[in-house]
Structures are given as structure tokens and as C-alpha cells.
Amino acid sequence: MEHLSPSTVFGIIGGDFRQAALAKGLIEQGYSVKIFLLENLPPFLPTELHCNDIQQLQCCDVIILPLPVSKDGSGDILNAPMSGNTLSLSECLSVCRSDTLIFGGKVSSTEEQLAQLFGYTIHDYLKREEMAVLNAVPTAEGAIGLALSERASTLWESRCLITGFGRCGKTLALLLKGFGAQITVAARSEAELAFARTLGMHTVPLSMLSFVLTEQEVIFNTIPHPILKEDLLKKISPDCLIIDLASRPGGIDFDAASQLGLKTIWALSLPGKVAPVTAGNIIRDTVINMIKEM
Amino acid sequence: MEHLSPSTVFGIIGGDFRQAALAKGLIEQGYSVKIFLLENLPPFLPTELHCNDIQQLQCCDVIILPLPVSKDGSGDILNAPMSGNTLSLSECLSVCRSDTLIFGGKVSSTEEQLAQLFGYTIHDYLKREEMAVLNAVPTAEGAIGLALSERASTLWESRCLITGFGRCGKTLALLLKGFGAQITVAARSEAELAFARTLGMHTVPLSMLSFVLTEQEVIFNTIPHPILKEDLLKKISPDCLIIDLASRPGGIDFDAASQLGLKTIWALSLPGKVAPVTAGNIIRDTVINMIKEM
Amino acid sequence: MEHLSPSTVFGIIGGDFRQAALAKGLIEQGYSVKIFLLENLPPFLPTELHCNDIQQLQCCDVIILPLPVSKDGSGDILNAPMSGNTLSLSECLSVCRSDTLIFGGKVSSTEEQLAQLFGYTIHDYLKREEMAVLNAVPTAEGAIGLALSERASTLWESRCLITGFGRCGKTLALLLKGFGAQITVAARSEAELAFARTLGMHTVPLSMLSFVLTEQEVIFNTIPHPILKEDLLKKISPDCLIIDLASRPGGIDFDAASQLGLKTIWALSLPGKVAPVTAGNIIRDTVINMIKEM
Amino acid sequence: MEHLSPSTVFGIIGGDFRQAALAKGLIEQGYSVKIFLLENLPPFLPTELHCNDIQQLQCCDVIILPLPVSKDGSGDILNAPMSGNTLSLSECLSVCRSDTLIFGGKVSSTEEQLAQLFGYTIHDYLKREEMAVLNAVPTAEGAIGLALSERASTLWESRCLITGFGRCGKTLALLLKGFGAQITVAARSEAELAFARTLGMHTVPLSMLSFVLTEQEVIFNTIPHPILKEDLLKKISPDCLIIDLASRPGGIDFDAASQLGLKTIWALSLPGKVAPVTAGNIIRDTVINMIKEM
């Protein structure tokens, strides 16, 4: 835990609103923060924190790169949509002190190798399990928000199906339970189904999915494999809203769904979209955990 | 309960999407339904149910007028935004059978007197307590939807204040609890505050409201009296979202709030806006309760 | 609120463990406390607080009599099961200062009149609504404790019926929901049934009770009128546990139930039995509310 | 799934009330059941199901041995506390058909090897994860029951610490949340702590446990390692109740706790003790899952 003290200076580079919220979150915890490539700061950040001079990176004990570090994974241009300037990963690292800790999100292997040339490891906070667990909350809230805005009925007393019962599935299921929805959980693992059952939910093995589709009013998929193909989609009511929370390739055959007239939403990367401030704080908490464990 | 049998014929006149959903809800329960002044039917209703001939009202055992019955309360033109035709309350009543039961929502005293001239009582479903209790659900879901779409943080771990702990306040508080929000309830009655406390919420007498305002991130008002005037508004953080769920005159000095740069939303009549299908079913359930008690 | 200050001295007289917990609870909030007729103090109370000299009542700004004040309502002997000494209400009042506030629980009309002779009003905290609301919590926990200890199955997935949906019914229903029980609420008022429905519970009008009895595994009655008479009891399974939480005359024909071989428990006055410390703190909070409103 | 059909005959041998409930649970699902070594049947089982002739095991397609199979793990005497007769595992297996499926709970390696000599595998249902997940429910309810009966305060508003956040910890935490307890979760894994945080609980790394002990009113341990040794026990209030749910060696230094005057309960094997009917049904559901997967 020696890496972290009240005088630790964090350098926050680029990124979107989340990265700005991360900076604010660190300040709220009493750390010193220098901000780079975020000129178009949201109003909650004091402009004097912004550094135009990249040499200031030398003062930073910890540097947090954006998520993703660069859009194409090459590291050529750091991901900085809120800035008019550009910086490459190499330029950045060539300025840093040798004892500076570097963090980033969704670090590509190219970026990793590049960092190693400079003698650094970019610690990827996106790989931490607690980050995934915490991110399930804004994801689930985002999914609820979509269901609320896209439907003409309450979630209360509506029949909701959740496919997959990992982190997102669990958090979403507990939220929906608070709404008084009638929840069915479909999953492969008997242990996960048993856990859903202990929470008072209906359960169905994934292999039996076809038997429960017709009655559903909202379907939330969290499984990143093609689960809902044409044969199953045909069983779904046209009034049903299908929200896919799974990362690529998603779990739904969107073309087939479209031809069947089904309403689908593929909701990717919800945390950064619906709750960037929370998402930024989750990055902060995760990075601080990582530093404490070093 | 003799008024209600499987062969009871309901006449549904005018109104918006809720009234159409009410018709559908009655059909789902097995009743016969005739629809008037709803030509622009939503796709879920079969067009053959629509009657162009007002004389068909004679076949109806129960007639359900819209909410409100007429927009200006005069009864001159029945409220029928989904129709190109018009009908007055007098024209309507002059066709009905003498034993037909008439229901309506938010019946004005003029409409009431008019009906009495024709020998009818218009039973107002909006006055029923169970209707208010059930409508608290779409209201609360609508309020949550606003909070989700208008903020950059999760409701989880956010500090939420609810002023008033009647039907809406209670239902909203329980929903927010499911989100993991940190809830403070402000109310006048010690008994209501005690109930909030049994639910695990922080409580504050309304007279002490000023002491808890600064820390709030979302404020939901349910009290239809000017609670949040300029002096109290000054204590609220500019990052806070204020949602007023109270009917006229509302609980917030919106002008003062605007001058202070506070973000406010006055969310009126949420059930019909965010969940018209549920709102229609709530009208159905309430009217059926009323008939059973006759 | 002028009656209450950090220097307020409370006199606590007689009563059971609740009254001792009340004394402790006041001390924890910083008040001075003198204790009378509670010689057999539980270990958590310092013995030097006990006054053998009744004249010390003159130092007390507020006196809290036990619940009930006297066992037979005559006021002849104050209710003091944890003491070897006796004191009458008259002896007590004749020592008090004229400006002392007197509180008691379940004050009889005889006691009231006696106090008036001395120029006092005994303020009855048991009549306060927030006291009833808060007492619903230990009552509900006590009922859960009975169901857990008397049955061979979990509450999870068990079918539970709650008759009556007042304070106790609501609090108990919400607790059982946390256990994952399948809850049916039977009540007279459509508004209460609607509230139960918003909480995701099954509902049945009290007049239809006979249709849902057979399937129940636990029945909790909260209605203090004979609801479950022989004809209805006959429909209940012999495996069902019936817990009556209603005050006299209770809601169950216990003789008929016994002859039918049904297992019944009449659980009266649970707060003082299962959670006297909490019950004492509830009295404290209620009395302090009452003083603040004076 | 070919092993299971409506005509499948189950043989239930020995065991306690759970095993009897298992038999009843299978009958309720429509299977044929023969019962052995359970002469002292509870009243809910028809006596004609009991077989005195061990040769009847030949008719059984599936045999379910008790939990544990034999008390000393030798297989010499099958565990049959509700019978006056004895039977060895060898005698049992020598009668069975070669295609009979054999299940048992907590099968010892001696029993396993013995079965292999006869050409059988004893499938151990206790090793199945869904069994552990479901058993967390009666365990948690049992723990709640103890906390309710052993304390003088409500769980509501009480400060509860849960050490360990595996299956039992999670289920218990969610139950306690329903009571309105103020829950702190101590665990080693940042991911588990994060999950507890998403559920609205306070969290503390296990290494920081000493900082939160003093304020606790109930401590539930679920970690089967000596967590609470003398140095930490010294920080716990004498009013605190400590319930150890962990299997041997448990998580508490009971001798040290006793010398410090702390109240501890080591609650082992709660499912069979507090909810044998549910425990029997959990065995049934687990065995049926296992057969379906064969």
C-alpha cells in the first residue's frame, strides 16, 4: 500500500465524461490531480487542473489512460474525444518517470508491447472482477431505463425473462424484483438457476427456453452467444421488447428479429452512456484497489 | 354483483390510449366491448369493435366515459383526442338505456348536474382510493424513468429525498430502495415518518427539511403545496435534480428554482403518459370493483 | 420543545425489562435518569441510578409510568414486577412537582381521574400512532420467529396467508416477502388490497377467504374479530400453522381449531416479550415526540 | 433423461426426517416410492410404503441412501436413526439390480470403494453445487431464527456483521436486508465485496475486520477457518451475539470467547435441524437434476 498516500499525484489523460468524473472522484478523496487532453471539461471540474504542457506528466505518480486507450488499439492516437489535441502512447510514456504506475482500460496487445519497450506495464482495470461486478449496476439501471421509456406498460406485473445469470443478470434480476415484475431466469448452470430460485424467481434451463418465450413482455439477454435465433424468435409476441445487453456478437439474430417485426434494442456499453459519473467512480475505486494490492 | 356477468356489454367512449387499453383489458377478461369515438385505434384493437353509429350505445350495459369526461368540464364536447368526430354528453346520455351504468373520470359538477337531468349518476372512478393506490405505481415508475434519463449517475448509492409519504411517496420510496439509493423521507406526520423508519429509510420532520437539502442528489416532491420556496431552494446543490410529482399548484417555486439555476421537472399525469396500458387496466379494475359493490 | 433540554431529568418507575431498556435508551441520548421500583435491574443499568427514596421524584421533569400503569387499572399498586416494593399512583403523584410531565402506557380511566384529582394529565404513549407503527416491527419479527421455530419447512417458497392489512399486516408481509414466501393478503378494503397488489402480493377480498384457505401453510391473523370460525377452519390443512397476532378477542375460534386438530398459537404482546430493548426504545422515541409537540 | 419416467421406482433407505420428507416429496411429484429402515415414519407418510423385506430393493430403479450414508463412514451400519433394524451397505448393494442408480450424501471413500467392489458408483448429491446453493436458504433461516430467539432486540436497526460472502453469506445478507438490519460484510475477495456493495451493504476487507467489530450487535461467521481469535474477540461488545455457521473447525476460538464472557452459538447442519422437510425436497430436486444429466 506504499504506492498510495495523500500526496499521490494522479495524471488523467483523455477519455470521455467518465474520465472527467474519475478526476473529480479522485479530488473528492483528497488526491492531487492533473488533467491532460480533456480541454472541454464538464463544468464540475476546475479549469486550472488542465495541463497543456505534457511535461507535467513527470509530476504524476499514477497515470490513468482512457477506456479504450486508443480507438484502434494501435496506441498511435490516445482516445481523447473531449480534446482538440492529440498525443500518442509513445509520446506519453517517453515523458513519464520510471516509477510511475500506468493504468488503462481495455489495453490492446499492441499497446501492451509498446509500453514494455518503454519499460512499463499498463495495468488493465477492465480485467478486474470487481469492476465488472460494479459495472453491472449502471448496466442494469440503463436496461431498466430503456424498458421504462420504450414500453407503454409498467414493469410492475410485467413478465420479464432474463437469459443468463452472471453479474449483469443477477443485478438486473434483483432490480426488476424491486419493481414487482414476474421474473423468469433462463441459464445453463443448475447452480445459477438454484440461486435464482432462492431469490424467488421462476427458473428454466436454457435448453427449455422455447417453452417460456411466448408469454414474455420484456426479454433481457446477457449471454454473448447467439441464443435467440429465428426458430425461437418466432415464438415471441410482437408486443414484447427485446433488450440485448451482451457484448459482441450479442445473443440475438437481429436480422431475423427485424423481419419478424420484433422490437429489439442492442444496448452496448451502458455504464459510460447512462451513468458516466458512476462509471468514472468505479474506475477510480478499481484502480485504487489495484494500487493497494501492489 | 348482479350487474356484472359474462354477457355484460361495455361501451367505451373517447379518451386517449388509456381508454383503448381499457377496452382491450375488458376483452381479455371476456367481456363484450363496443368502442366509440376512438377511430384511430392502436393496432392492438380490432377495428370491427368500433361503432360509428351512436345508437349502438343502447346495447351497452355499462358505459365508461374518458378521463376527463370533457376537457373544459362543460360536457359540451366529450374528450376524444383519437377521433375526428365530436359528441356532447347530452347526445350521449339521450341514447343510453335507463338501466345503463355510467362511469367517468374526474367528473365536473356541471357534468354531474347534466347527467342528473337525464336521470343518471356518473360514477367517478378517479375518486376511488384503490385507483389512487394503483396509479402510484406508474407514477413512481415514471419518476424513476425521469431520474434515470436526466442524470449522469446511477440511482444506486445516490442520496434521494422524498417529500411527502402518502401513496406516491411510499411506492416511490420502496422502488428507490430496490435501486440501493440512500433515501431520506420528509413528512409532517410522525406516524408516516415512523413507517418510513420501519422500512429502513432516514426520516426528517418536514419542519427540519432545511437541514437535509444540501446533500441531496435527487429530490422527489409529492406534496401539492408550496414546500420548496426560494429560501430552501438556495440550499440545494446545482447538481441536484428536482422532480415534482405533485398536482397543481405543485410543491416547488419553479421561477425561483430557474433563477437559481436548479434543474426541475414538473411531471404531471405520469400514468397516462408513461404507462397508458397499465393505466387503462387500472381503470378497468377500479370500475369492475365499483360495479361489484353496487 | 421548551420542555426538553440536555438537562431534563427523567424518572422511570416500575415496569418490566422494557422500562429498564427505556431508562438505558434515555441515558444513551444524554439525558439524566432516576429509576424507581426496578431494584432487580438488568446488568446493563448502573445500580447507582436506582433511587430508594421516592422523594427523589421531585427532581424529575418527566415521569414515565409503566405499561400498563397498574395491573388492575385501579392505580392502587403501580405495575412493578422487577421490584420487591410497592407504590400507589396517589403516593407517586403526591410527591411530584406541579410542572412535572407524566406519561404512562394503557392508562385506565380510573387512573386518569385519579391523576386529575392531583392536577395532572397522564399522557398515554400507547395511544400514539407512531408507537403502533413502530411496534409492528417487533410484532412481525416475533411472528416470524414463531413460524421459524414451530415449522419443519422454510418460510421460503411456503404459502403464507395474512388476514388484515393494517400496520402489523403490512410490516409482516414485507418481512415475509424478504424470505421469498408466496404471500396472499386477505382484507376488506379494496384500497388495502390494491396496496398489497402494488407490493407484488396475491390478494383476496375477506369475503372470498374460504377459496384460498386450503393451500396455505402458515396463516397469520391480524384482525381482532372472529374471522376464522369452524366452517372456515375446516378448510385448513392439518399441516398448516395458524398464528393469531390480534388482541382480544383474537380472530380464531381456538376451541374449534383444537377439536379439528389444527395447530394454533395466540401470540399476544410480542414486542415486550421478544424484543423488550427495542420496545423500550420505541416508548422513549414516542415520549420524546410527545414532549416536542407540547 | 431416459433414466427418469413416471414409472421410475425410488427406494429410500434410512436417514432422518429429511429422508422421510424426500420420500414424500417424490410421491408428490408422482413417482413410486418404497421405504426401508424408516419404521418410525412421521404421520405424513402412509405406512404401507414401508418395506420390511429388503429384497424389495430389486424393484427400485433408483436408491437414495441417507446423509451421511453411515455414521462412521465405514458402511458397516447404514445411518437409520428412525429404525430399530440395521443393514450394512454390502447387504444393501448385494440385493440391488445391476442397472439401479445409487445416490447418497457425504459418501466416504471407504463406502465408495465398497460400492465399486459391487460394480456401483454412489453418486454423492452433497457434492452438487445447486444443493449447496439451495441449502443456504434453510441455513440462513435457521441463523435468523437463532438471532430472533436469543436476543432482546429486533434485527431491524441492529448492526449485523457477516464474515464471508459465499453462498450462505449472500443468502443471509439478503434476508437480513429484508429485516432492515444495518449490514456490514467482511470478505477477502474484492469482487465479493463489490457485489455486497451493489446490494447496498457496508463492506470491509477481512484484513480490516478489527476496525468494525466493536459496534456490532450480531456477528454471523460463515468462514470455516479461525477468523475470530482472542485478539479480535476482545474488541467485541459483551452484548453481541456471535453465531458461527461454518463447518469444522468453525471460525471462532470458542474457548477464548467463553473466557471473555461472549455469547456464542455454533450452529452446525441447520437445514436438517430447522427445516427437514425443505432439506428433503432439496435432496429430491438435486437427485432428479443428477439423473436428468446422466
Image (tube, coloured by chain):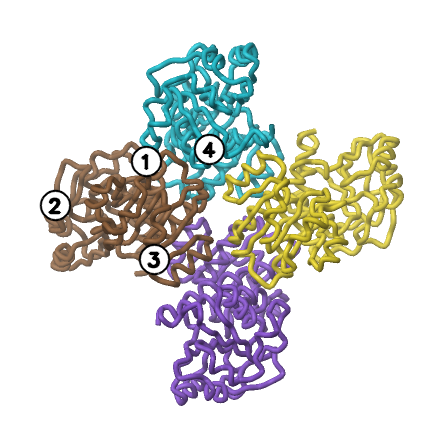
Chain colours: A brown, B cyan, C yellow, D purple
Q: Which of marks 3 and 1 is nearer the N terminus?
A: 1
Q: SS for tag 4?
A: loop
Residue picked out by circle 3: A208
Q: Where is residue C20 in the image (x, y as percent from the top left)?
A: 73, 50
Residue picked out by circle 1: A150
Q: Which of marks 3 and 2 is nearer the N terminus?
A: 2
Identify the image quadrant of residue B243.
top left
Residue type of the residue flagged with mark 2: Ile
Q: SS for tag 2?
A: loop
Nearest to the eye among marks 3 and 4: give it.
4
Label 1 environment density (alpha carbons within 10 Å; few <14, some 14–19, many ≥20) = some
Residue type of the residue flagged with mark 4: Tyr
Measured Cα–Cα span from mark 3 to mark 1: 28 Å
User: Do the residues at discs 3 and 4 belong to one chain?
Assistant: no
Residue picked out by circle 2: A77
- Between A261 and C200, the one lying in front of the other is A261
Measured Cα–Cα span from mark 1 to mark 4: 29 Å
Chain ID, mark 2: A
Label 4 environment density (alpha carbons within 10 Å; few <14, some 14–19, many ≥20) = some
Asked whether residue C209 is in view, the answer is: yes
Measured Cα–Cα span from mark 3 to mark 4: 34 Å
Residue at image position (49%, 32%) is B7
Nearest to the eye among marks 1 and 4: give it.
4
